[in-house]
């Protein structure tokens, strides 16, 4: 049994004790379960010594054919009379039962339910009514579907307005994870793919030109039909590549020298922070702006990389073998 079904069954066990008149009418089949549940929710707000009498009046009216709207009007009169009979009670009692429940289910879908105060219900209804108007004669969405879309539109506008309180010093954002396969199916994705392909071809041409001048790695750089032909029967070996950000090299050299100078010191918080800075800058070296194409152009122009000689260090810093200094 699901959690929701279990809650529904146990709720009727409690109602049977507090509302015997309602339960009796429900057992005979004369009173629908949905109406019986609403009547119990209404009379639960009355003092205990007045609930049975209220149940009798409401059940009799329901069995006589009174509509739910008329039943609500009758209950409103009963409720106001009960308040008048107890003038010492707080007339401005806060609606303590107010609640909104949002449960995330399979594949991120959500189930929302709640009990709203009159003020909140009126505000929500006004927003949903304003944003749920049919989009035209061809709009075949149901009222519930249009309300759902209106709620999403209202939340999106609220986030985009930038008026929500920040969380951890950052503005509220919605993170959406979309796979490359789905992005490629979007309208206009072919233009993006063509632009990306053109950039890769340009970089590939740079590799080929550099290999022709410097000898490369004894391999051949192919594209187009030539690449497709040789890849058909070739043995594939996976490799990992990255772009070189030359601008990060100077900072990396400086941090390496500083970390190497602390190799005999205490492994304190300052040392750990410096080690993380070295790791972060090493990542920047491969993934930051500039890239390999810029690096190749600098080499072709005869520019030297900035920085001083340093010893390379590992995750647990130790002196590398002699002669391994680099620029």
Image: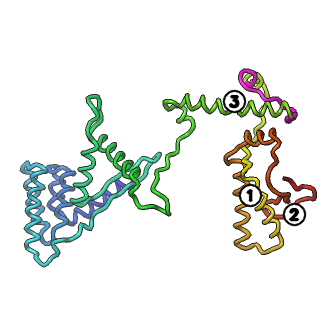
Nearest-to-viewer mark from 1 and 3: 1
Instruction: Tell me how far mark 2 sits from mark 3, CA to CA.
Output: 41 Å
For label 2, the SS is loop
Categorize mark 1 by other alpha carbons within 10 Å: few (<14), some (14-19), many (20+).
Answer: some
Q: Residue 81, can we see it?
A: yes
* Span colored in magenta: 214-227
Residue 285 versus residue 297: which sits nearer the camera? 297
> Looking at the picture, does residue 244 appear above or below residue 206?
below
Q: Which residue is mark 1?
A: 251
For label 1, the SS is helix
Which label's residue is closer to the chain start, 2 or 1? 1
Categorize mark 2 by other alpha carbons within 10 Å: few (<14), some (14-19), many (20+).
Answer: few
For label 3, the SS is helix
Residue 322, numbered label:
none
**Residue 39: image location, x then y, percent:** 17, 58
Residue 319, numbered label:
2
Nearest-to-viewer mark from 2 and 3: 3
Categorize mark 3 by other alpha carbons within 10 Å: few (<14), some (14-19), many (20+).
Answer: some
Residue 214 versus residue 186: which sits nearer the camera? 214
> Looking at the picture, does residue 132 appear above or below residue 197?
below
Q: Which residue is mark 3?
A: 201
Residue 103 versus residue 160: which sits nearer the camera? 160
> Image quarter for residue 133?
top left
Q: Residue at x 74, y 48 (%)?
A: 246
- Magenta highlight on residue 216: yes
**Residue 241: image location, x then y, percent:** 74, 42
Q: Residue at x 82, y 65 (%)?
A: 260
């Amino acid at each position: 049994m699901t959690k929701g079904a279990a809650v529904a069954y146990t709720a009727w066990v409690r109602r049977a004790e507090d509302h015997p008149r309602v339960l009796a009418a429900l057992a005979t089949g004369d009173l629908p379960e949905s109406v019986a549940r609403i009547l119990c929710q209404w009379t639960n707000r009355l003092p205990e010594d007045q609930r049975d009498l209220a149940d009798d009046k409401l059940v009799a009216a329901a069995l006589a054919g009174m509509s739910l709207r008329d039943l609500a009007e009758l209950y409103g009169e009963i409720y106001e009379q009960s308040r008048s009979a107890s003038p010492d009670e707080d007339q401005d009692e806060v609606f303590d039962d107010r609640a909104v429940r949002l449960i995330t289910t399979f594949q991120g879908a959500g189930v929302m339910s709640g009990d709203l105060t009159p003020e909140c219900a009126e505000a929500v209804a006004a927003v949903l009514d304003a944003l749920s108007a049919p989009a035209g004669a061809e709009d075949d969405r149901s009222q519930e579907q249009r309300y759902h879309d209106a709620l999403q539109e209202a939340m999106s506008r609220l986030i985009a307005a930038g008026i929500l309180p920040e969380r951890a010093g950052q503005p509220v954002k919605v993170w959406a994870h979309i796979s490359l396969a789905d992005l490629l199916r979007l309208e206009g994705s072919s233009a993006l793919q063509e632009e990306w392909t053109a950039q890769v071809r340009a970089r590939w041409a740079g590799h080929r030109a550099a290999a022709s001048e410097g000898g490369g790695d004894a391999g051949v750089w192919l594209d187009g039909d030539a690449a497709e032909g040789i890849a058909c029967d070739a043995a594939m070996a996976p490799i990992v590549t990255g772009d070189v950000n030359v601008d990060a090299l100077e900072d990396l050299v400086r941090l390496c020298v500083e970390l190497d100078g602390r190799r005999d010191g205490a492994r304190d918080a300052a040392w750990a922070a410096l080690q993380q800075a070295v790791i972060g800058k090493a990542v920047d070296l491969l993934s930051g702006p500039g890239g390999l194409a810029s690096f190749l152009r600098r080499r072709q122009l005869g520019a030297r990389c900035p920085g001083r000689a340093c010893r390379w260090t590992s995750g647990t810093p130790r002196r590398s073998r002699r002669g391994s200094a680099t620029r």
